Amino acid sequence: MQELPIRLEMVFGQVKKALREDLRGRFVDVGSDHGYLAIRCLEEEIADFAICTEIHKAPAQRSHDALTEAGFGDRAIVYITDGLKGVELQPGDIIVMAGMGGLNIIDIIDRALKDNGFHTIENVTFVLQPQKSNEIVRNYLARTGFVFEDESVCYDRDIFYNCMRVVFKGISTTLTDEQACYGPVLLKKYDDGDEDVAGYFEHLNGLFEVRQRSNPVVKAALEERKANENK
């Protein structure tokens, strides 16, 4: 079985939760990082077919070679393209964007909405693991009409990571600054006593103490978090 680092195991966990037996689709990995996640999904039959995209030829070739060596050459395809450009999405697809900047994720989703239409996107699940700009990503998703189905965190090689699983409902909502910066689902998990989330929030509090000096959204979120913890 294809081994994954802790960060990608977290992402894979959200992919498994996204699986719908009534609408089984493909696994689509944007920026596939050697194709390891696609291999794991095919091994565990999360999807019958995998699509990997890479913007540059060399990493695309690495993903292609890894999938072929694993015996999945006939059940996967690798595109050299920017994000999801040229990939026609289908109902039931599970799309992963992990290890990239939040603004890049927003751009890719925005173009996917325009290229595929709301009806198709409504039946697609996005599993997102931004490296930065989480509050901007969450605000965009809520404003655009996505619903947060789940969020998770992990600690891998001295770094905290978070992952969110969202689906499009087409109804715009507004997050509080606290929800945008800490995560609407993670806040509920924290209140339920999740120790992993508690450690992540402690880490965020330290970061936000510094960032609040130049970021009014972070400052408001930190103040709201402190107020809620003191209730």
Image (spheres, rainbow, N blue to C red):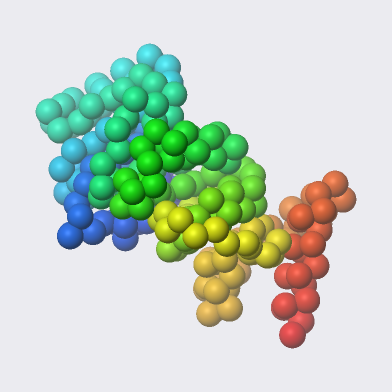
Q: Is residue 152 left or right of residue 44?
A: right
Instruction: Tally the numbered discs.
Output: 0
Indicate the position of residue 46 as horizontal and vertical percent values: 21, 50
Query: Residue shown at 61%/53% (left/top)?
Result: 139
Q: Is residue 150 left or right of residue 79?
A: right
Q: Residue furthest top?
A: 57
Indicate the position of residue 61 as horizontal and vertical percent values: 31, 18
Residue 203 or residue 30, whichever sits in front: 30
Work out whether residue 18 can be spotted.
Answer: yes
Q: Is residue 83 above or below residue 21?
A: above
Q: Is residue 51 above or below residue 6?
A: above
Q: Residue 217 lies in what quarter of the image?
A: bottom right
Q: Is residue 227 above or below residue 172?
A: below
Q: Is residue 123 left or right of residue 153?
A: left
Residue 181 or residue 122, whichever sits in front: 122
Work out whether residue 69 can be spotted.
Answer: no
Quarter of the image containing the C terminus? bottom right
Query: Residue shown at 58%/54% (left/top)?
Result: 143
Q: Residue furthest right?
A: 213
Quarter of the image containing the N terminus? top left
Q: Residue 218 lies in what quarter of the image?
A: bottom right
Indicate the position of residue 18 as horizontal and vertical percent values: 31, 57
Query: Residue shown at 68%/65% (left/top)?
Result: 176
Query: Residue shown at 59%/70% (left/top)?
Result: 187
Indicate the position of residue 200 as horizontal and vertical percent values: 61, 61
